[in-house]
Image: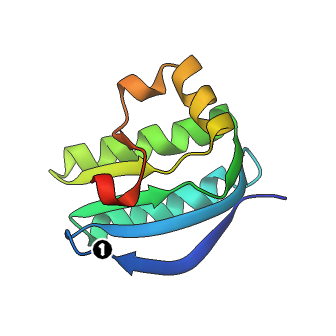
Amino acid sequence: MAGEIVQKETKLANGWLAWRVEGRIDISNAKSIYASGEKIVEREDKTVLDMEAVSYISSAGLRVLLGLSNKAKREGKEFAIARAADTVKKILIYSRMNLFLNMRPSLDDL
């Protein structure tokens, strides 16, 4: 199953806006996920991508996360990812993306 952007956005009590992707983040959907995330980052001061339902992330997906994080930093905003499944978390750690991304174990941890 390709990654789908779930349009449900949730404003968290601490001022963060959470949005969600399900399935895989790979070359087949990286551009559309980045485009949706870019709009959210432009609109909000604090955004978190809820990755609980992401089963796989490719190098194209890693570029999406890094691009959104860099965009937020350039604009003086915050971007985080939260609740990455163990398989995705391993990919993020093995690729050393955890050194560049604000990774949180839960949405309450922001």
Residue under the point 24% across and 52% down: 78
Image quarter in which the C terminus is found: bottom left
Residue under the point 61% across and 27% down: 90
Above or below, comparing residue 10 to residue 107 in the picture: below
Write down the residue under mark 1: 12
Displayed quadrant of residue 85: top right
Q: How is the image coloured?
A: rainbow
Image quarter in which the N terminus is found: bottom right
Q: Looking at the picture, how far across and down is residue 7, in whole percent?
A: 56, 80
* Residue in the foreground of this view, choosing between 90 and 26: 90
Question: Which amino acid does the dot numbered 1 rest on?
Answer: Leu
Above or below, comparing residue 5 to residue 3 in the picture: below
Above or below, comparing residue 51 to residue 96 in the picture: below
Displayed quadrant of residue 12: bottom left
Q: Looking at the picture, how far across and down is residue 45, in whole percent?
A: 20, 64
Secondary structure under tag 1 reads loop
Count the numbered circles shown: 1
